[in-house]
Image: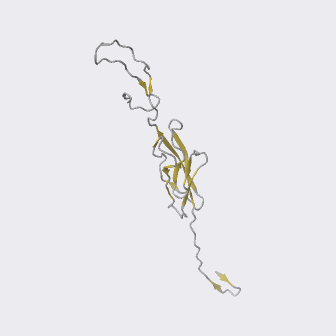
Amino acid sequence: TAADEAGNTGQQTVSLGITNLDEVAPSITSSATASAIAENSGADQVVYTVTADDSSDVSAGVTFSLAAGSDAALSIDASSGAVSLSTDPDYETQSSYSFTVVATDGAGNKSQKAVSLAITNVDDTAPTITSAATATAIAENSGADQVVYTATADDSSDVSDGVTFSLAA
């Protein structure tokens, strides 16, 4: 309302719009545990894909990164969220990887989730023959079908489904 000295008044209705700001961080919806991978399965493979939901307010999209302190052998595609392992996994060297994924929306709001990746052990170590290199002597003409040597082996240095024996060609 506006009034002059003579008492005349005028009114104007004014509307004020409130714009919605992006003030809510995206929610990471992917699991805190990556699917385990077998050792010796190859380098440069995608081992996890982070997903996030940023629909709770205005959104200009989500980008992904790895937090400081994540394993250096891991990298992430900022747009797809695909996490790759640059080295060939080896259970005996490193049986798991830990990393933290970060989802950042267009306004800079961030959320993060710690993720673990297990490396499964496979039988990649040959058994060690532990029996003697020489069989015990037997007398000639002592008969057929007798045991002349018993081979033994140790396969305990890795995962094992047992040992089988054969004669070399």
User: Which residue occupies 40% across, 23% down?
Assistant: 152
Of 97 and 141, nearer the camera is 141
User: Which residue occupies 51% across, 42% down?
Assistant: 89
Residue 6 x/y as whole percent: 69, 88
**105 relative to 122 in the view: left or right:** right
The colour mode here is: secondary structure
Q: Is residue 141 positioned above or below 130 on the image?
A: above
Of 67 and 18, nearer the camera is 67
Residue at the front extreme? 140
Of 82 and 15, nearer the camera is 82
Residue at the right extreme? 5
User: Which residue occupies 60% across, 59% down?
Assistant: 108
**169 relative to 23 in the view: left or right:** left
Quarter of the figure with the N terminus: bottom right
Residue 154 x/y as whole percent: 44, 25
Quarter of the figure with the C terminus: top left
Image quadrant where residue 4 sits: bottom right
Residue at the left extreme? 144
Q: Is residue 30 positioned above or below 2 on the image?
A: above
Q: Is residue 58 positioned above or below 130 on the image?
A: below
**166 relative to 19 in the view: left or right:** left
Residue 115 x/y as whole percent: 52, 46
Residue 107 x/y as whole percent: 59, 61
Of 157 and 140, nearer the camera is 140
Q: Is residue 8 positioned above or below 57 on the image?
A: below
User: Which residue occupies 54% across, 43% down?
Assistant: 98
Image quadrant where residue 168 sits: top left
